[in-house]
Image (cartoon, rainbow, N blue to C red):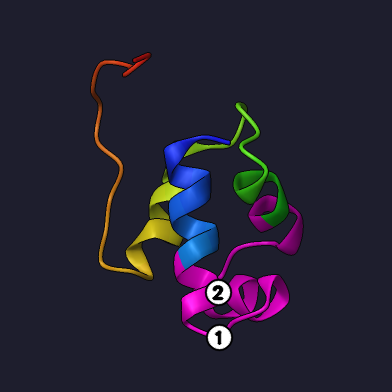
Amino acid sequence: MNQIAEYVKKNRREAGLTQKEFAARSGLGLRFIRDLEQGKATVRMDKVNAALEMFGAIAVPGKRDDT
């Protein structure tokens, strides 16, 4: 699982939200939230940032950390 997927899943659970509740509150689709939390590589960055915004975070470009 990638870092964004782990971050969203961890913070969603800490907030006490189901995937369905999180999708409704963030304005994103349930399928997108599921794909995001599973680390699907083809998710749209604008939607990723909408999800991260719920926790005061944003994804920024950077080099892959393969270590």
Q: Which numbered dot is residue 32?
A: none
Could you say which quadrant of the image residue 56 lies in?
A: bottom left
User: What amino acid is found at the position of numbered circle 1 in the picture?
Assistant: Gly
Residue drawn at x 68%, y 70% is 19
Look at the image and say whether residue 43 sits in the magenta stretch.
no
Residue drawn at x 54%, y 80% is 25
How far apart in space, not on screen, are marks 1 and 2 (Cα)? 5 Å
Against 47, residue 51 (above or below) is: below
Look at the image and say whether residue 14 sits in the magenta stretch.
yes
What stretch of residues is rendered in magenta? 11-33
Whether residue 47 is visible, yes or no, is no
x, y (%) of residue 39?
A: 61, 37
Residue drawn at x 28%, y 50% is 58
Please name the residue that numbered disc 1 is placed on.
16
Q: Main secondary structure of the magenta part?
A: helix
* 17 sits left or right of 38 in the view: left
x, y (%) of residue 23?
A: 63, 70
Q: Give SS at disc 1.
A: loop
Could you say which quadrant of the image residue 4 lies in?
A: top left
Please name the residue that numbered disc 2 is placed on.
13
Comparing 18 with 60, the one in front is 18
Residue drawn at x 73%, y 63% is 30
Comparing 59 with 2, the one in front is 2
Q: Give SS at disc 2.
A: helix
Could you say which quadrant of the image residue 61 lies in?
A: top left
The residue lying furthest to the front in this view is 67
* 24 sits left or right of 67 in the view: right
Give neighbour class at mark 2: few <14, some 14-19, many 20+ (Cα, 10 Å): few
Labels 1 & 2 near each other (Cβ < 8 A): yes
The residue lying furthest to the bottom in this view is 16
x, y (%) of residue 1?
A: 58, 36
User: What amino acid is found at the position of numbered circle 2 in the picture?
Assistant: Arg
